[in-house]
Image: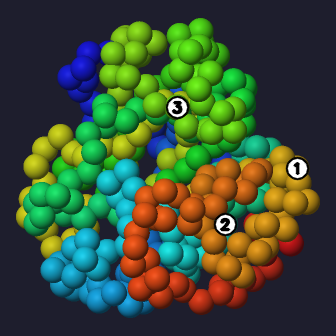
Amino acid sequence: MSKNVSIEFKEVPRFKAGSEEALEYLDEEGFVVFANVLDSIQTGKALSLMWDYLEELGTGIDRNDKDTWSDKYWPTAVHGGILPSYGVGHSKMQWYVRDIDDVKTCFASIWDTDDLLTSFDGITIWRPWTYQEEWKTNLGSDWLHIDQHPIGRPGKHCFQGVLNLMEVTRYTGGNVMIPKSHKRFELIPEHYEERLSRIHPSIDHFRFPKDDPLLSDTQPIVALMEPGDLMIWDSRTIHCSSHGIERPPNSDDLLRVGSLICMMPKSKSNTKVIEQRKEAVVNRTSTTNWSDRFINADEFPQILAVEDRQKYQWPAVPELNEKQRKLVGW
């Protein structure tokens, strides 16, 4: 891959939740798009709940006033737009989308079980950089990575997801995937033996250089998607996100909103982790995508570095229904 790698924005097949064809595509390509997992009414409600969460942080954010979307009011973001903390993993928006039947159906079909645990992930929000240039997110080729240690976790372990609440276009940008790259996962230790020796096997993040020889013949893509589409990918698939390749028109709206969501079989977890997860609900602790271990996203260095993080008013302890409680581990 050249240092000036280009990203292709393209239409890809969109499948019905739980279809066999979707599973075959995921196995071959390393990612899949499930169509209309949320309908338009559900998508609209999720977006409204997202704004409720932001406005109730108490910093002065107003969904109708872009001047209040500045970093002075906005919660801490990582990688240009992921909100990982301040109770976001237990916001009403996140618990609302986890409770939608087709969301769980997609993950249940992949794992061949409906006895699943959900991550307490955050939200991806991209503000319109035509209004403020510093809101522009990273270029995709700058941080292509995998979220699974090639030595510490060999083989198939996790499937991550982003539930898109807005259209993904050449203007908005979106998730970047390297198709079929999960099939080269086992080759990574051969190419990066020394570098991997410095990364603890429990660290499930590995970033690739732009000129990685494993990727020299592979075109990165952004899948064009509709509001309500759910993209799921194998954690061994090389991916990232990227701003669009065309300047978006001036807009009073956000560019991108996505609910980060991951579900794994309960059988992969253990009693200690499940008890930590129950405490996390009470404490409104957000996590990473992994539900077979407990990784506190509120302890990310970017969050701990914020001196005035106490100014944020966290959401109330969620009142969960029986389906949602089961996704925690009860």
For residue 206, which numbered disc appears in the image? 3
Residue annotated with mark 2 = 101
Q: Classify residue 124 as left or right of residue 115.
A: left
Which type of secondary structure does the marked residue at label 2 adopt? Answer: helix
Neighbour tally class for label 3: few under 14, some 14-19, many 20 plus, Cα within 10 Å? some
> Considering only vertical position in the picture, is 6 above or below 228?
above
Residue at 42% x, 89% y is 56
For residue 300, which numbered disc appears in the image? none
Q: Nearer the viewer, residue 95 or 202?
A: 202
Q: Classify residue 301 as left or right of residue 63.
A: right
Q: Earlier in the sequence, mark 3 or mark 2?
A: 2
Location of residue 65 by image quarter? bottom left
Q: Earlier in the sequence, mark 1 or mark 3?
A: 3
Q: Earlier in the sequence, mark 2 or mark 1?
A: 2
User: Percent position (x, y) of residue 20?
Assistant: 67, 38
Name the amino acid, label 3: Phe
Which type of secondary structure does the marked residue at label 1 adopt? Answer: helix
Residue annotated with mark 1 = 267
User: Percent position (x, y) of residue 241?
Assistant: 36, 43
Q: Classify residue 280 as left or right of residue 128.
A: right
Can the viewer see residue 311 in this picture? yes
Neighbour tally class for label 1: few under 14, some 14-19, many 20 plus, Cα within 10 Å? few
Structural distance between the alpha carbons of marks 3 and 2: 33 Å
Structural distance between the alpha carbons of marks 2 and 1: 21 Å
